[in-house]
Image (cartoon, coloured by chain):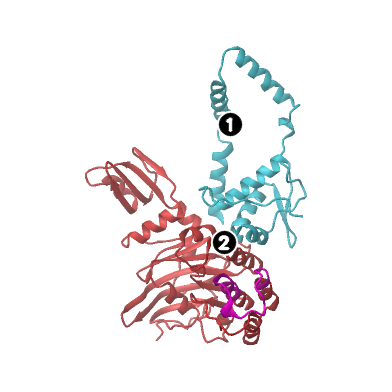
Chain colours: A red, B cyan
Amino acid sequence: MSTVMGDRGSAEDSAIEAYGLGKRYRRGWALKDCSFRLPAGRICGLVGPNGAGKTTLMGIAVNLLQPTAGTVRVFGEAPGPGLGAAGRRTAFLAQDKPLFRRFTVAETLRLGRELNPRWDQRTAEDIVRSGDVPLTARVGTLSGGQRTRVAFALAFGRRPDLLLLDEPMSDLDPLVRHELMSVLMAEAAEHGTTVLMSSHMLADLEAVCDYLVVLASGSVRMAGEVDELLSAHTLLTGARTDEGMPADLAARHTVVESRTSGRQFTALVRPDGPVTGDLHADSPSLEEVLLAYLRTPGAPPLISPSAHAGPHPHPHAQHTQEAAA
Amino acid sequence: MKEIEFRIDRRSGVAAYQQIVLQTKQALRLGVLLPGDRLPTAKEVAESSAVNPNTTLKAYRELEREGLVEPRPGMGTFVRQSLAQPQAAADSPLRGELAAWMDKAREAGLEPDDVTALVASLLQERYAGHGASAARSHSRESEERT
């Protein structure tokens, strides 16, 4: 398998590789035949409607959940109990940011130090201090933004190579969100951390993510470099015909979504060759592309080459996989 | 030490890395950045504008490909070359010739819009294959290589 040059100059390893991953709960499949690869060093957004399987996917990657089908590799290893390399190199920040409310900030960091052999007290303290969070304050008395900051400190103190964040910004005001996003990006810059972050705030993701995985109804709809995903699409507007979009266009290109209004049609397509005809072609924004895929469950998925995962995807991967549990 | 701070406009529709490239070039043209100056590190840009470090590094790689900056391992990215053009300075012969031509155009009765249109059409003719469109296709090409 060829190696691709990474954004931070080294050969690109895989942070996460999922292959045929599935998880069934009593009410049905939360995740089904989910395959993708996240190269190391990326800041990746995980997008999808509620119930798309985002939290389940993260849970499996950090060994909180067992998959019903398929395999996942984190830095080439199956996620195991905390002491395995994959577990040591990974930190997970759950949506409800579980912290002990009665602990002070200092005690919370102390707990992190006791529980993690690779603990980096200075990084953790710097994150807390730069937000003017008093070390002596009890966690229960902190504001939402301050609590998230302490949770960030706890996560980065573990010096993870992969940080998974489940809706980290959902309950924060725009100012705090910007501040914490800056902390996140600065820490990722300094330590080369791979970040996988789920969010409903498409605009926020567009600003910070260079990689994207889009889930809908438990499977991958789109995965890859943001730039590649964007440049693969064109937004076309033109005069509608009786059936809406001109049939020859639909035959020649991959249509993700088309809509008509009055005499006009608008279509998001993946052009297979030059687009001809009396049309206006425009580059869509990331938000437009995402919304089109989320609205159209039948649209053909788009997985860019760097996001492809196979059954034997990586030279370092152990070959002890196949249908677990 | 930090000579400039980037201002990233999320709503401009211009990719963040391109905004960094353009703002750096602008600073080089205006002489705000001089050879030997250090560009802000990816971490500094992240801290000030919450920009993904990969975005900043991508912009710096593009500037490096154009020969404008160079990375020095462990130290940062430094300006190699200014973009200030001595040939375009206020006392340059080129500017003098253009001024003389413009006087003639005015005597001939051309309005400012006519002059602009004339200059634009000649610019397109004489610089065909240069400039913005060429730079864009160049950057797309190089993206595919990464």
Q: Name the mark nearer the viewer: 2 or 1.
A: 2
Q: Chain of mark 1?
A: B
Callout 2, which amino acid? Leu
**Mark 2 highlights which residue?**
A175
Question: Which percent across, then down, holds residue B22?
Answer: 62, 45
Residue B81 in sight in this render:
yes
Q: Is residue A166 above or below residue A87?
A: above
Look at 55% across and 44% down and name the residue there.
Answer: B136
Q: Quadrant of the C terminus of chain A?
A: bottom left
Q: Is residue A49 left or right of residue A117?
A: left
Residues under labels 2 and 1: Cα distance?
A: 45 Å
Residue behind mark 1: B127
Q: Who is closer to the viewer here, A47 or A40?
A: A47
Q: Amino acid at mark 1?
A: Tyr
State the count of labels: 2
* Residue sitting nearer the eye, A260 or B21: A260
Task: Report the magenta residues as a range.
Answer: A128-152
Element marked by disc 2 = helix
Q: Is residue A134 highlighted in magenta?
A: yes
| Figure check: A322 above or below B137 | below
Q: Residues within 10 Å of mark 1 (few under 14, many from 20)?
A: few
Marks 2/1 in contact by CB < 8 Å: the verdict is no
**Which chain is home to disc 2?**
A
Q: Residue at x 68, y 74 (%)?
A: A123
Q: Position of residue B9 (x, y in %)?
A: 56, 50
Residue B142 percent location from the top left of the image:
57, 51
Q: Which mark is residue B38?
A: none
x then y, percent, for residue B11: 51, 50
Q: Are marks 2 and 1 on the same chain?
A: no
Q: Nearer the viewer, residue B112 or A271?
A: B112
Q: Residues within 10 Å of mark 2 (few under 14, many from 20)?
A: few
